[in-house]
Image (cartoon, rainbow, N blue to C red):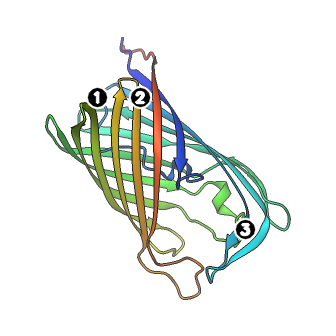
Amino acid sequence: MRIPRFPLALLAAAGGLIGAGIEAAWGGAWLMPPGDGQVIADTFFSDSTRAFDAQGRLIPVPSYQKFELGTYIEYGLTNWLTLVASPSYDRIHNPPPGQSYNGPGESEIAARVGLYRSDTSVLSFQAGLRSPGGSFADSLGPFEVRRAASLDFRGLAGRNVVVAEMEGFVEAQAGYRFYAAGQPGEWRIDLTMGLRPWPRLLMMLQSTTRRLSTVPSNSAMSPGPSCNQAWFMTSRQTGRCRSEAS
């Protein structure tokens, strides 16, 4: 009989990633031990009565509200392979002529392969398939921008650190996302630092930078880089899930 551990982390977030849902890179470069896993749940709410048009001007739009519930799950299959799933749920209220939506949101399945590990450092590679979900399949946003499914490939590096007698880590991820339906690809860089002031409290600062590789002349998307930063605090509770082995 095997009883794998599944710690549960409840997330409180503030900053530039509000509304990003599972877009934030919860996963790190480290792999889960075989038979162990973790579950991270997050919720976001956003609303707006103004938005930027294709020329970058702020214009009034009908009241737009969006609630997101995301879940990030990792499970260690072997010493060198961790499986990842991040299903999500969206509820969008968009007055006519816009469309409202209630159902699956942007979700992903991925696999992370370990390349190198020491007592303080780790290198890994991750490949994932991302579904846009129903909320991005149809025109629900103010400017009818549609997002396609994508393939995400990234390299990850992490290192354990100690700052002011607090244990922590620094981590960097760099990769490229290929979109279907002829949409431009996207370079991505994610930087994260985490510190534990107390054993059960983890504080994280994260920066996400994205840049589209090519943008059609008639596209409303900007080719320039976008950058978000956010603070995160997680409180970890440990649960157990039982599985039977013959």
Q: Quadrant of residue 196?
A: top left
The type of residue carrying mark 3 is Arg
Q: Nearer the viewer, mark 3 or mark 1?
A: 3
Quarter of the figure with the C terminus: top left
Local packing at callout 3 (Cα closer than 10 Å; few below 14, some 14-19, many 20+) is some
Q: Which residue corresponds to mark 3?
A: 50
- Looking at marks 1 and 2 on the same chain, the residue that comes earlier in the sequence is marked by 1
Q: Going 29% across and 27% down the picture, which residue do you hit?
A: 34
The kind of secondary structure element at disc 3 is strand
Q: Which mark is residue 33?
A: 1
Using the numbered discs, state the Cα–Cα distance from disc 3 to disc 1 in whole angstroms: 46 Å
Mark 1 vs mark 2, CA separation in Å: 21 Å
Of labels 3 and 2, earlier in sequence is 3
Q: Are marks 3 and 2 in contact (CB under 8 Å)?
A: no
Q: In this view, does 94 lie to the left or right of 218?
A: right
Label 3 close to label 1 by CB (< 8 Å): no
Residue 30 in sight: no
Residue 237 drawn at (x, y percent) = 46, 22
For the residue labelled by badge 2, is the local secondary structure a helix, a strand or a loop?
A: strand
Q: Name the residue under label 2.
A: 201
Q: In which quarter of the image is residue 188?
A: bottom left
Q: Hey, what amino acid is under mark 2?
A: Leu
